[in-house]
Image: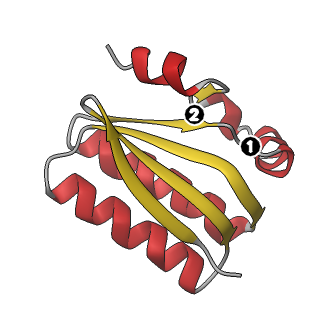
């Protein structure tokens, strides 16, 4: 299964529910396209819900970093919600856990943007 993205809004925060695999090819392309679309439309508060991500490879990790960079360039913030154990482990191994703000509770994550 490739990646599926569902974008919704909670107040002024855009939540992207991600499910499936974020891998080289279709998965990372979908993420890149969604982030570009949001940042060019002026979205500045993005919460990436990774609770249903079954697999992520180095290309997928790269897309998370690119997304963070893209949002920062327009003066915005991207945070992660509910990363799976695999994603947490990869963030820790790459020291990206020091760069990404990670939340386990959606309501708390949304409030953290204020």
Q: Residues within 10 Å of mark 2 (few under 14, many from 20)?
A: some
Q: Residue at x 24, y 31 (%)?
A: 12
Residue 99 position, x and y percent, is 58, 32
User: Residue 32 falls in which quadrant of the image?
Assistant: bottom left
Q: Nearer the viewer, residue 33 or 20?
A: 20
Residue 1's place in the image compared with 92, above or below, is below
Q: Residue at x 27, y 35 (%)?
A: 76
Q: Which residue is mark 2?
A: 100
Q: Which mark is residue 3?
A: none
Q: Nearer the viewer, residue 102 or 50?
A: 50
Q: Which mark is residue 91?
A: 1
Residue 27 position, x and y percent, is 58, 77
Give the position of the C terminus as an image quadrant. top left
Q: SS at mark 2? A: loop
Q: Are marks 2 and 1 in contact (CB under 8 Å)?
A: yes
Instruction: Name the side, left or right, on which 101 lies relative to 88.
Output: left
Instruction: Name the side, left or right, on which 106 lies relative to 84.
Output: left
User: Residue 57 falls in which quadrant of the image?
Assistant: bottom right
């Amino acid at each position: 299964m490739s990646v599926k993205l569902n974008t919704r809004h909670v107040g002024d925060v855009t939540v992207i529910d991600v499910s499936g695999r974020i891998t080289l090819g279709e998965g990372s392309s979908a993420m890149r396209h969604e982030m570009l679309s949001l940042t060019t439309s002026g979205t500045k508060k993005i919460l990436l819900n990774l609770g249903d991500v079954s697999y992520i490879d180095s290309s997928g990790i790269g897309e998370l970093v690119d997304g963070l960079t893209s949002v920062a360039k327009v003066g915005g913030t991207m945070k992660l919600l509910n990363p799976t154990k695999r994603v947490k482990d990869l963030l820790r191994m790459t020291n990206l856990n020091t760069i990404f703000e990670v939340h386990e509770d959606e309501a708390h994550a949304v409030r953290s943007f204020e």
